[in-house]
Image (tube, rainbow, N blue to C red):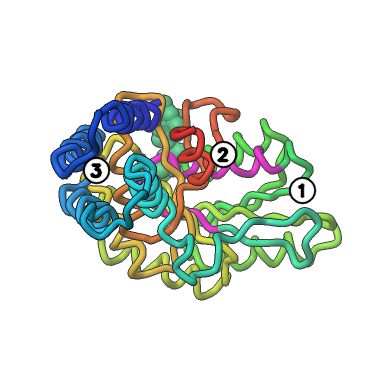
């Protein structure tokens, strides 16, 4: 996984710094250059790298460190803190933590998925619902994608395979109406008693065009989701920033799922999406199979990385 490669490069940069006999300005500068190179190689946006560099530099101003301070530790801490902030910008910012569904919750939580066509949104909706089913939830899936021919059947068949209740319509072309009906059914119908998590799949387009963004805004307004998840294809690289920003401007994106991390993508695009939405990556998609979804926790990722 490419984030792991980024991790290794950063560990290498810190190890080189720790080996220096005397920690002076040149050692700090070399370490900063190593860190920046690792981030750029992972496809993180230049602007983000520059900001990270500036904050580490101001946190480890050797002249202002008290005598006797362990300089190696101070540098390591600054790098770790900055990395943590980059992966989970909400942490420590006063923003409420990312919504986490609770088993048995009444009324059922609504999690709405948004993203461009081909990002892996429909596949990820099923993976996400199935992940929760395996951990004791009673999830349901709603298809509010009335734009792409085949979306309904794809979701319906995958839901059936996973044994997850599903709602969609072959006749209704208004996505807002289908979404509201689906949420209502799983929240209020006797037959759906016990349902505690409703996952809403939405339309995509090939670009973040105005019509799509307006549709997402209306869907969010009508279904009032507890969480909006932005699905991003890891291979889109630097375009991720503007794409994520466009979605963020029309709906309150609360979390990001990055798909296709099993491919050749470098992962930096994911970090740019995080920077744009100020929301954490909660899962990563690692294949086409339903079980190919890994929970991602920025804090433990960073702690593991740096021991
Ligand atoms: P949507 O248009 O955003 O709903 O995208 P789909 O869910 O239809 O996915 C588009 C393609 O990406 C399909 O062929 C999926 O099997 C594939 N896909 C989705 N997630 C992943 C992933 O994590 N890894 C890989 N290798 N393929 C994925």
What residue is at 46 percent from the left and 53 percent from the top?
Answer: 280
Give the percent coordinates (x, y) of residue 174.
48, 65
User: Which residue has dot 2 on it?
Assistant: 295
Give the percent coordinates (x, y) of residue 19.
29, 26
User: Which residue has dot 1 on it?
Assistant: 138
Q: Is residue 189 visible?
A: yes
First along the sequence among labels 1 and 3 = 3
Q: Nearer the viewer, mark 1 or mark 2?
A: 2
What residue is at 84 percent from the left and 57 percent from the top?
Answer: 193
Q: Secondary structure at mark 3?
A: loop
Locate residue 189: give its quadrant: bottom right
Q: Are marks 1 and 3 in contact (CB under 8 Å)?
A: no
> Quick one: 260 or 48, which is closer to the camera?
48
Classify residue 221 as left or right of residue 22.
right
Disc 3 from disc 2: Cα separation: 21 Å
> Quick one: 289 or 105, which is closer to the camera?
105
Q: Are marks 3 and 2 in contact (CB under 8 Å)?
A: no
Classify residue 110 as left or right of residue 252.
right
Residue 133 lies in the magenta-colored region: no
Disc 1 from disc 2: Cα separation: 19 Å
First along the sequence among labels 1 and 2 = 1
Q: Is residue 146 visible?
A: no
Q: Check the image and report above or below for 285 versus 80.
A: above
Q: Nearer the viewer, mark 1 or mark 3?
A: 3
Residue 130 lies in the magenta-colored region: yes
User: Which residue has dot 3 on it?
Assistant: 44
Q: Residues within 10 Å of mark 2 (few under 14, many from 20)?
A: few
Q: Are marks 1 and 2 in contact (CB under 8 Å)?
A: no
Magenta residues span 112-132
What residue is at 67 percent from the left and 48 percent from the top?
Answer: 166
Give the percent coordinates (x, y) of residue 217.
42, 71
Name, please, the residue furthest toward the front.
Answer: 67
């Amino acid at each position: 996984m490419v984030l792991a490669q980024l991790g290794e490069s950063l560990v290498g940069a810190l190890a080189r710094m720790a080996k220096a006999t005397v920690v002076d300005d040149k050692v700090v500068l070399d370490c900063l250059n190593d860190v920046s190179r690792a981030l750029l190689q992972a496809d993180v946006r230049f602007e983000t790298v520059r900001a990270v560099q500036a904050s580490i530099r101001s946190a480890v101003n050797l002249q202002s460190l008290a005598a006797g301070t362990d300089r190696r530790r101070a540098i390591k801490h600054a790098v770790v803190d900055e990395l943590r902030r980059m992966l989970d910008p909400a942490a420590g910012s006063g923003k409420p933590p990312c919504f986490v569904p609770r088993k048995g919750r009444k009324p059922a939580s609504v999690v709405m998925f948004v993203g461009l066509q081909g990002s892996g949104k429909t596949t990820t909706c099923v993976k996400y619902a199935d992940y929760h089913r395996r951990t004791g939830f009673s999830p349901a899936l709603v298809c509010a994608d009335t734009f792409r021919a085949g979306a309904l059947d794809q979701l319906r068949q995958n839901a059936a395979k996973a044994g997850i209740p599903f709602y969609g319509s072959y006749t209704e072309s208004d996505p807002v109406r289908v979404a509201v009906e689906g949420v209502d059914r799983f929240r209020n119908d006797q037959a759906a008693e016990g349902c505690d998590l409703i996952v809403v799949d939405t339309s995509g387009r090939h670009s973040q065009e105005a019509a799509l963004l307006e549709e997402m805004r209306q869907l969010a307004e009508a279904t009032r989701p507890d969480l909006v998840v932005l699905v991003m294809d890891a291979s889109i690289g630097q375009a991720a920033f503007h794409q994520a920003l466009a979605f963020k401007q029309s709906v309150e994106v609360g979390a990001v799922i990055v798909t296709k991390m099993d491919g050749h993508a470098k992962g930096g695009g994911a970090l740019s999406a995080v920077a744009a939405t100020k929301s954490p990556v909660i899962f990563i998609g690692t294949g086409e199979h339903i079980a190919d979804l890994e929970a991602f926790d920025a804090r433990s990722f960073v702690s593991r990385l740096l021991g």
